[in-house]
Amino acid sequence: MSAGVAGVAIPDPVPETLRRGARALVGMRPPGDALASADFPMLVITGDHRPEYEIIADAIAPKTGADRDVVTGMEHLLPDTGAPFNARLESFLNHAE
């Protein structure tokens, strides 16, 4: 493995699925660009289980003015954390009104 962008390890040789994904991203606008001009409150929330997801979320939040948070315990299935996710979402929605 070698150090990739932002310290995320990239296997050597690079798997074909990763190559295809990288090729698909070429020329795309970063996800935060489309949301930056949106006129509604946003919450960017992750599970802190994949460093690359955290890097992406950390980049999107300030570009969009979104609130940023992490709820751990269920990896990608954030709503399955139950009370921690629900409390964070409720707080966001109450302040967004």
Image (cartoon, grey):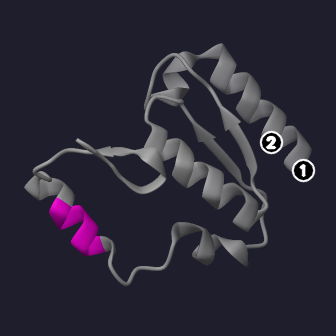
Q: Residue at x 70, y 73 (%)?
A: 36
**Looking at the picture, how far across and down is residue 42, in whole percent?**
72, 55
Does residue 50 sit above or below 80 in this rendering?
Answer: below
Dot 2 falls on a residue whose secondary structure is: helix
Q: Is residue 23 magenta?
A: yes
Q: Label 2: which residue?
A: 93
Q: Which residue has dot 1 on it? A: 97
The total of numbered circles placed on residues is 2
Residue visible at 90% across and 50% down in the picture: 97
Q: Amino acid at mark 2?
A: Leu
Q: Is residue 92 magenta?
A: no
* Nearer to us in this view, 58 or 46: 58
Q: Quadrant of residue 75?
A: top left
Neighbour class for label 1 at 10 Å: few (<14), some, many (≥20)?
few
CA separation in Å, label 1 and label 2: 7 Å
Front position in the image: 6 or 66? 6
Locate residue 9, reporting x and y percent: 33, 43
Q: Secondary structure at mark 1?
A: loop
Q: Is residue 47 above or below residue 54?
A: above
Q: Is residue 3 left or right of residue 79?
A: left
Residues at circles 1 and 2 in contact by the CB criterion of under 8 Å: yes
Judged left or right of residue 58, residue 22 is left
Residue at left offset 14%, top offset 53%: 14
Main secondary structure along the magenta-highlighted residues: helix
Find residue 29 and report its horizontal and vertical position in percent: 48, 79
Q: Residue furthest front?
A: 2
Tag 1: amino acid: Glu
What range is drawn magenta here?
19-24
